[in-house]
Image (cartoon, rainbow, N blue to C red):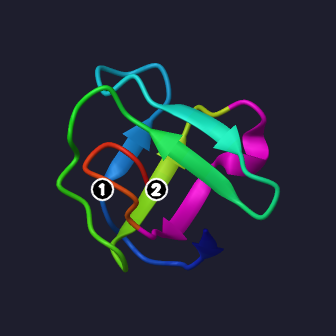
Amino acid sequence: MQERLATGPTIVVGSEADPTITNTGTGALVTTASAQNLYTGNVITITGAIPSAYNGTWAITRQSATTF
């Protein structure tokens, strides 16, 4: 994910979307329990992640309806 300052949907770790974040070695992969209707180029904000380096505002690359 490439950091970008903008406003967009917020993905809250520990929320009803129940996202998990996995280090891919070149970035991070977010997986949610339900479809998020997000697409490549959308900008999201992640909060509540551990490690906190995952928190921030990011432009995403969609992998599937539940991963980006």
Which mark is first along the chain, 2 or 1? 1
Q: Image height check: is 42 above or below 20? A: below
Residue 1 shown left or right of residue 64 in the figure: right
Residues 58 and 30: in front is: 30
Answer with the quarter of the image where residue 3 lies: bottom right
Q: Residue at x 78, y 35 (%)?
A: 51
Residue 58: say if magenta. Answer: yes
Residue denoted by label 2: 45
Q: Which residue shows up at 66% across the image and 53% down it? A: 28
Please state, as top left, top right, bottom left or bottom right, where the C terminus lies in the image. bottom left
Residue on which disc 1 sits: 9
Amino acid carrying mark 2 in the image:
Thr
Q: What's under tag 1, amino acid-wise?
A: Pro
Q: Secondary structure at mark 1?
A: loop
Q: Is residue 22 left or right of residue 39?
A: right
* Label 2: few (<14), some (14–19) or many (≥20) C-alpha neighbours in 10 Å: many
Indicate whether residue 59 is drawn in magenta.
Answer: yes
The residues tagged by marks 1 and 2 sit, at their Cα atoms, a distance apart of 6 Å
Secondary structure of residue under mark 2? strand
Q: Which residues are magenta?
A: 50-61
Where the N terminus falls, by quadrant?
A: bottom right
